[in-house]
Image (cartoon, coloured by chain):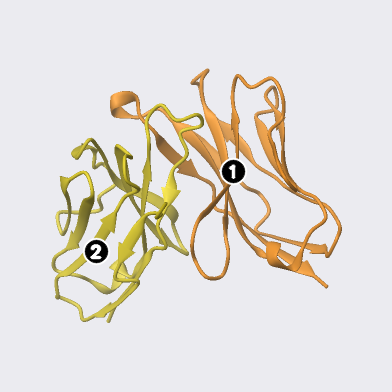
Amino acid sequence: AQKITQTQPGMFVQEKEAVTLDCTYDTSDPSYGLFWYKQPSSGEMIFLIYQGSYDQQNATEGRYSLNFQKARKSANLVISASQLGDSAMYFCAMRARAEGGSEKLVFGKGTKLTVNP
Amino acid sequence: DAGVIQSPRHEVTEMGQEVTLRCKPISGHDYLFWYRQTMMRGLELLIYFNNNVPIDDSGMPEDRFSAKMPNASFSTLKIQPSEPRDSAVYFCASCLAGDRPETQYFGPGTRLTVL
């Protein structure tokens, strides 16, 4: 069964510093996708970044980058130059095979990031 | 372009009442998902549709929950009768098969409180 594990319930970082949020996954499917979402206190789920299992390079989107280590089954999110607005819950998710072969996302429990001034 | 639209944003009801949550997916998207988020269980997929057809409803907790998608631009999630343990945030999400990546875009959610 597909599973996502986020071992850090909470993380703290100083403004302008970088922070890494951990995510490990488990799947037997050779083709999969990994997503990171941000959920601020307002509640919406915001897509941040995606990494495909066959992508040769680590994904980057502005200050977000994904440290993808396939052999270790990890897909850690790196946020550089943290800003106060980065304070939020962060969820790692994996696209898992489902009936019809479609896009069922399995989510981790999330990590609450607090950026201190 | 408008994102996924959900209504109402907040719903407070009494135990035993019927609750209907609504969702309008992003135009052109052919997949629609309903999720429930609670502190205890995190984000759970309840059901999803492809081209208006329910594909997997294994996450629907019990017969009190039902979902429909009468057309490509509208879906409902109904709880009848509602119970306090149904209190949660319910999200609707949509995506387009074939997009690279096939990213699910979430609506703002409906916060349901059952008293």
User: Is A56 left, or right, of A99 in this rendering?
Assistant: right
Q: Residue at x 50, y 29 (%)?
A: B100
Residue wearing tag 2: B21
Chain in yellow, by letter, is B
Q: Chain of mark 1?
A: A
**Three-letter code for the amino acid on which mark 1 is drawn:** Thr
Residue at horizontal 51 percent and vertical 26 percent from the top = A32
Q: Is residue A42 visible?
A: yes
Disc 1 to disc 2, C-alpha distance: 30 Å
- Check disc 2: other Cα within 10 Å, few if <14, some if 14-19, many if 20+: many
Give the class, few, some or many, for how many residues have Cα within 10 Å of label 1's Cα (few <14, many ≥20).
some
Q: Amino acid at mark 2?
A: Leu
**Nearer the observer, B115 or A79:** A79
* Residue placed under numbered mark 1 in the picture: A5
Above-or-below relation of A114 to B105: below
Please state the horizontal and vertical placement of residue A115, each as a whole percent of the image: 76, 66
Q: Specify the quadrant that holds the C terminus of chain B.
A: bottom left
In the image shown, does A85 or B77 lie closer to the viewer?
A85
Q: Colour of chain A?
A: orange
The answer to whether residue A1 is visible is no
Whole-percent x, y for residue B82 in the image: 19, 70
Q: Is residue B77 above or below residue B102?
A: below
**Which of the 4 image quarters holds residue B97?**
top left
| Residue found at x 23% / y 71% | B83
Select label 1 or label 2 by which is in front.
2
At numbered mark 1, what does the secondary structure look like: helix, strand or loop? Answer: strand
Left-right relation of A44 to A18? left
| Side of A13 where A34 appears, left or right | left
Disc 2: host chain: B
Q: Residue shown at 14%/68% (left/top)?
A: B81
Asked if labels 2 and 1 touch by Cβ distance under 8 angstroms, the answer is: no
